[in-house]
Amino acid sequence: MAFGKKTGGRKPGAKNKKTLQLEALMQSAQTKMQELIGDEAFDGNALAFLATIYKNGKLPLDIRLDAAGKAARFESAVLAPVDGKGNTVPNYVAYLPRQCETAEEWSAEFEHLKSETAPKPSH
């Protein structure tokens, strides 16, 4: 035994076999993509690059899923939130003119505005 000194194994900061294999696979995939599409293929087009990654069945599934998840928000429309009747749900922001200690205090202070702006009931 080497009394407090490391005598074998990987050096600190060295990559393990799985990391080296993954890097080699990614390098070969990049080389193949450049051969197929050319050097200028992904100049400013990140979506095409992500699509190429998630469609490549030779890459690990976790990398493909990550690329697909990042590309999905650009490949399909995002749906707006709707209520049960199919109407879009508006976002309301209330700005309070001054800080009140309780909701009752605020309600009492602005009670007069309620009667001025409230819609009149139709009979």
Image (cartoon, rainbow, N blue to C red):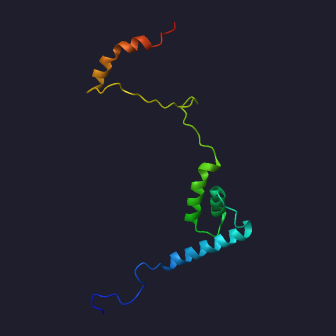
What percent of the width, then of the height, locates residue 31? Answer: 67, 72
What percent of the width, then of the height, locates residue 118? Answer: 44, 14
Residue at horizontal 44%, vertical 14%? 117
Check the image and report above or below for 82 versus 72.
above
Check the image and report above or below for 121 versus 4.
above
Check the image and report above or below for 25 versus 113.
below
Residue 97, quarter of picture: top left
Q: In this view, does 13 lie to the left or right of 90?
A: left
- Residue extending furthest bottom? 1
Residue at horizontal 54%, vertical 36%? 81
What percent of the width, then of the height, locates residue 34? Answer: 69, 69
Residue 23, quarter of picture: bottom right
What percent of the width, then of the height, locates residue 3? Answer: 27, 90
Residue at horizontal 66%, vertical 66%? 56
Residue 80, quarter of picture: top right
Closer to the camera in the image, 6 or 65: 6
Residue at horizontal 65%, vertical 56%? 45
Which of the image's four quarters has the N terminus?
A: bottom left
Q: Is residue 101 left or right of residue 13?
A: left
Q: How many labels does the image show?
A: 0
